[in-house]
Amino acid sequence: MEYTIADQADYKLVTVSGRLIEKSQAEGLIKEFEGLVSNGTNRYLMSLENLEYVNSTGLNLLIGMFTQARNAGGELVIGGISPKVKKLMVMTKLDSIFKIYDSVAVASENF
């Protein structure tokens, strides 16, 4: 799994790619995200277009990030999602919790 976090006008763009199957793969992302939240950043747009696979561990990570952003008075939305990951989000009914947009561009216009 690889990730980047980029500054945008009023949110952070978090891009995740590869396969997210173990918490140890995401330790850097978790620590960086927690640091941003503790420093007052609470708006995140997450791109999952290049995330090939995610299991329950990866879903728990996404839920945890969503919860941290919400608890800080902010929001985490998904802009762009791979078909396999979207199918899993629908099967687990997480699509009713996360705001999922077709692309980063659409999400940024509506965020």
Image: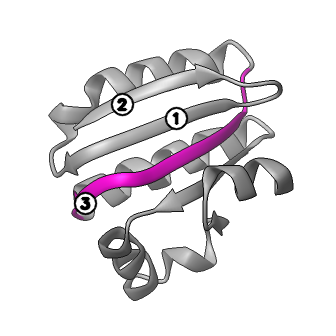
What whole-number distance in Å separates the C-alpha atoms at marks 2 and 1? 7 Å
Report the residue marked by disc 2.
Answer: 3
The numbered disc on residue 14 is: 1
Dot 1 amino acid type: Val
Q: Which of 99 and 6 is in front in this view?
A: 6
Q: In this view, does 1 lie to the left or right of 29?
A: left
Q: What stretch is highlighted in magenta?
A: 41-55
At which x and y percent is residue 83? 37, 74
**Which dot, 3 or 2, sits closer to the camera?**
2
The reply to whether the magenta stretch includes residue 42 is: yes
Residue 106, quarter of picture: bottom right
The numbered disc on residue 91 is: none
What's the residue at 77%, 41% (across, down)? 74
Q: Which of 111 and 69 is in front in this view?
A: 111
- Magenta stretch, main secondary structure, is strand
At which x and y percent is residue 55? 21, 63
Dot 2 amino acid type: Tyr
Looking at the rendered structure, the secondary structure element under dot 2 is strand
Looking at the rendered structure, the secondary structure element under dot 1 is strand
In the rendered image, the quadrant that contains the N terminus is: top left
Residue 86, quarter of picture: bottom left
Q: In this view, does 89 lie to the left or right of 17?
A: right
- N-terminal-most mark, 1 or 3: 1
Dot 3 amino acid type: Val
The numbered disc on residue 54 is: 3
